[in-house]
Amino acid sequence: MYKALAVILLLAATSADAADNGNAPTANPAVAHPEMTAQTSVSGISPIAAADIVERQHAIIIDVREPSEVARISIPGAINIPLSQLKNRLVELDKYKQSPIITQCRTGRRSQEALKTLTSSGFSHVQNLDGGIVAWEKAGLKTDKKCC
């Protein structure tokens, strides 16, 4: 039963992905589509687990929000590099290539893109903060709240 459900879900995902790309579904439903594999390999981490890694392993947090967003609230010690500037500023992060890195934005969407950029650029220990700073704050973790 679980196997049949897995095949059905894979077919549905492949068909949806094909519709998005304007392609027909793959002929062999048992083989995952390359884009699907890449999407499921994106590593997410809960705010509590992220705070633990920052504390124990001195992980670096890369905040990819715009400066105006960071001005309102931020995670202490996070490095702000807006997503739109990340590719051009990767050299600033070279010293962290082998360090644990957590990408973070408001809710996790932009930071997921940042994770993909970092991993494709040779950063080996990158995770995305699930739910972004919204989830971090909801979990009661420390923030620098400046206004509003």
Image (tube, rainbow, N blue to C red):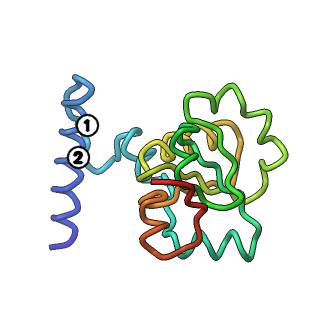
Label 1: which secondary element: helix
Identify the residue shown where x is 47% and y is 67%. Answer: 137
Pointers 1 and 2 in contact (C-beta within 8 Å): yes
Q: Amino acid at mark 1?
A: Asp
Furthest residue to the right? 95
- Amino acid found under the numbered disc labelled 2: Ala
> Vertically, is 83 above or below 148?
above
Where is residue 99 shown, x and y percent of the image? 77, 57
Q: Position of residue 36 (x, y in %)?
A: 36, 44
Residue plotted at (51% across, 44% down): 69
Residue 112, label in figure: none
How many residues crowd mark 1 within 10 Å: few (<14), some (14–19), many (20+)?
Answer: some
124 or 44: which is nearer to us? 44
Per the rendering, the mark at residue 17 is: 1
* 60 to 109, vertically: above or below: below
Residue shown at the point (61%, 60%) measured from the top left: 75
- Disc 1 from disc 2: Cα separation: 6 Å
Instruction: Identify the residue under disc 2.
Output: 13
Q: Classify mark 2: residues with Cα within 10 Å, few (<14), some (14-19) or many (20+).
A: some
- Residue in front for this viewpoint, 106 or 24: 106
Against 135, residue 113 (above or below) is: above
Q: Is residue 11 left or right of residue 52?
A: left
Q: Secondary structure at mark 2?
A: helix
Is 8 drawn above or below residue 112 in the view shown? below
